Amino acid sequence: QKEVEQDPGPLSVPEGAIVSLNCTYSNSAFQYFMWYRQYSRKGPELLMYTYSSGNKEDGRFTAQVDKSSKYISLFIRDSQPSDSATYLCAMQDSSYKLIFGSGTRLLVRP
Amino acid sequence: KAGVTQTPRYLIKTRGQQVTLSCSPISGHRSVSWYQQTPGQGLQFLFEYFSETQRNKGNFPGRFSGRQFSNSRSEMNVSTLELGDSALYLCASSKSGSNTGELFFGEGSRLTVL
């Protein structure tokens, strides 16, 4: 079993829809939770990071962490075609390496 | 401010050969991490260097090695290449490798092993 599980998709939604992306994990030592976005032929870029349980909002993006369920989510409101990319969750314990999910491909249709 | 630069961007090798990939981090960043990305396994951590010292290592065989120079530039080497080493190799830098997870990635070096 992988430490971080993420549905690979693809997830196809119409423009303007609310998108929900999720990851589950097994290691209770994870303390920091991140979402990265990766466009085709590019490196990942950090979208959001949160520490421990709770919500964090940044514009159209909301990250949610539920440590009791070992479950994290990224919500995208009013999705745009430019949001079409692969979204990777990542987690970190007290060491300095990130453990990534396999990524979910998102396609927002105009 | 220049981003993370990786060279070469694309390369083709044959089984048994070796390869060296280079990474120049963002100016002022002292931590460099390397990741392997494949469609089947996703992003897998190779190793992390901070101030020329390997601070963390992933679960890859000894054929994968790296180093960091005094100017924070880093190289990784893969010896005795296997078909399964075909992947996108990503380098990421951060100021101190702190626990914010704020890594800045380069565009990667795409290695094809024939």
Image (spheres, coloured by chain):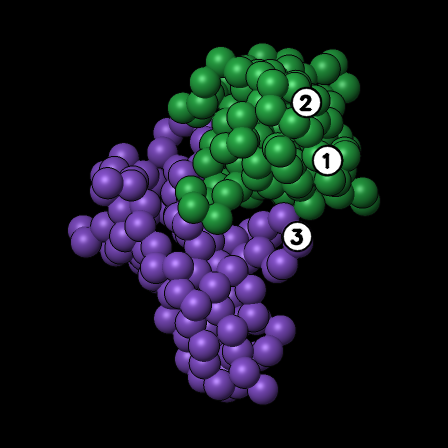
Q: Secondary structure at mark 2?
A: strand
Task: Please give the residue where the numbered disc 2 appears in the rendered image.
Answer: B19
Whether callout 2 and callout 1 share a subunit is answered yes
Residue at the spot x=54%, y=83% of the render? A109
Task: Please give the residue where the numbered disc 1 appears in the rendered image.
Answer: B11
Q: Secondary structure at mark 3?
A: loop
Whether callout 3 and callout 1 share a subunit is answered no
Q: Earlier in the sequence, mark 2 or mark 1?
A: 1
Q: Where is the N terminus of chain B found, in terms of image quarters?
A: top right
Where residue B110 sits in the image (x, y, percent)?
Answer: 66, 40
Task: Please give the residue where the numbered disc 3 appears in the rendered image.
Answer: A42
Q: Colour of chain A?
A: purple
Q: Are marks 2 and 1 in contact (CB under 8 Å)?
A: yes
Left or right side of B22 for A79: left
Residue type marked 2: Val
- State the green chain: B
Question: In the picture shown, does residue A60 fall above or below B49?
Answer: below
| Mark 3–mark 1 distance (CA, rounded to whole Å) | 16 Å
Where residue A73 sits in the image (x, y, percent)?
Answer: 35, 62
